[in-house]
Image (tube, grey):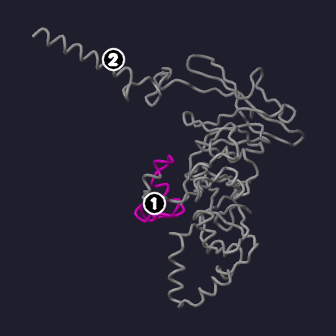
Amino acid sequence: MVAAAARMELLPPVLFLFLLLAAAPATAAKFTCNSTAPRANTCQALISYTPSNATTTLAAVRALFQLRSHRGLLAANGLPPSTPPPAPAPSPVRVRLPCLCSGGVGATFQRPTYKVRAGDTLDAVARGVFAGLVTFQEIAAANNVSDPNRVAVGQELWIPVPCSCDPVAGQGVVHYTYVVPQGSSVAGIAQEFGTTEETILSVNKMADAKSLLAGQVLDVPLRACGSNISNTAIDRNLLVSNGTYILTANNCVMCGCSSNTWQLDCQPTQGLSTSACPVSKCGDMFLGNTSSTSTCEATKCSYAGYTNTTSFTILANLTTTNTCNAAGMAPTAQPEHSSAFRVEGWRWTDLVVSLHVVLLCLGYLRQD
């Protein structure tokens, strides 16, 4: 480390500055975070992390970001609860971390941290270890490091990954810290994550879509599912985006986000003992159970949060949803994008119609 720093000192000042700027990521990111409502100055944010090694395991990702549980990492990526820690991590892999708003900007709270190894520089830590989620300048500022090229082996650094807790257009969202891949466009990113170009440009204070750069760290707000959680519940600010689930109520309840109804779908977590998790019911119905009350209505025992004032209690209440469309007709069993029977890319109904046309044509030719 000292030898490397000495070699850098031999460079002309102008050349040194050029190399320093060339090594930096496309842009530093400061996510606006002004949430001031009770309990809203902290939240759970999602981070997109691309491992440098294709063989990186879920266990390695958990260790890097100091995640408290393996289940939490599985939940952030929508992976089955039975997925083992040695399984390969998806690329990119989503990491759920606590976000803290302070001074109008947001950064992950206390985690992750990194212990400096021999040969490390702050730029190598920022770009190599944490895949460009932060810049070396941000790490230096957060840890009061005056010289980014002189860090002590064994020194523990806080890595302030940008995040946010702010609502967007008056709606609660899950903010996703996203490093822009090469060849991306604002329109493509908006389509991939179910938002709009205008929203991305506004949230990130970008003048226009042409200013997007590869390696730029974007704040992508993900739509969150609505819920029936009580305003008095401990987890009343629970936000879950599509493609993920969350373990809440001391891990006793698993809540996913339905892209069809955009409502939380919560069930008791499988594999936990009833002694650790109290039973939650709506009359004779258990939490998560559904019954049809009519052709167009379904009643569900929905999750309503948990309390721990006098004792640990999981709340639930009955909710009724309309399962018919505006014309009063029940939805079809097989939507257009379903896995209905196909022959070499053809739907079965298309094949029948085509055969019918062919037979009519053959009959016409025979008459001639």
Q: Is residue 9 left or right of residue 84?
A: left
Instruction: Give, as a three-letter code, the residue at label 1.
Output: Gln
How busy is the neighbourhood of tag 1: few (under 14 within 10 Å), some, or many (20 plus)? few
How far across and how far down the image is residue 334, in percent? Answer: 47, 24
Q: Is residue 215 left or right of residue 291?
A: left
- Identify the element where label 2 is drawn: helix
**Quadrant placement of the N terminus:** bottom right
Residue 271 to residue 292: above or below: below
Q: Is residue 53 left or right of residue 230?
A: left
Answer with mark 2 or mark 1, whichever residue precedes in sequence: 1
How far across and how far down the image is residue 320, in percent? Answer: 64, 26
How far across and how far down the image is residue 332, in percent? Answer: 48, 22
Q: Nearer the viewer, residue 101 or 27?
A: 27
Q: Is residue 30 magenta?
A: no
- Tell me where residue 367 sits by quadrant: top left
Q: Check residue 190 in the rendering and tell me which mark sits there, or answer none.
A: none
Q: Is residue 207 magenta?
A: yes
Q: Which residue is mark 2?
A: 352
Q: Which residue is at 71% across, 68% downward?
A: 158
Instruction: Give, as a three-letter code, the residue at label 2.
Output: Val
Q: Which residue is at 73% across, 43% downward?
A: 231
Q: Is residue 324 left or right of residue 354?
A: right
Specify the segment rendered in magenta: 190-217
How far across and how far down the image is residue 267, in percent? Answer: 71, 32
Q: Which residue is mark 1?
A: 182
Q: Find out whether the residues at labels 2 and 1 contact each other: C-beta distance under 8 Å.
A: no
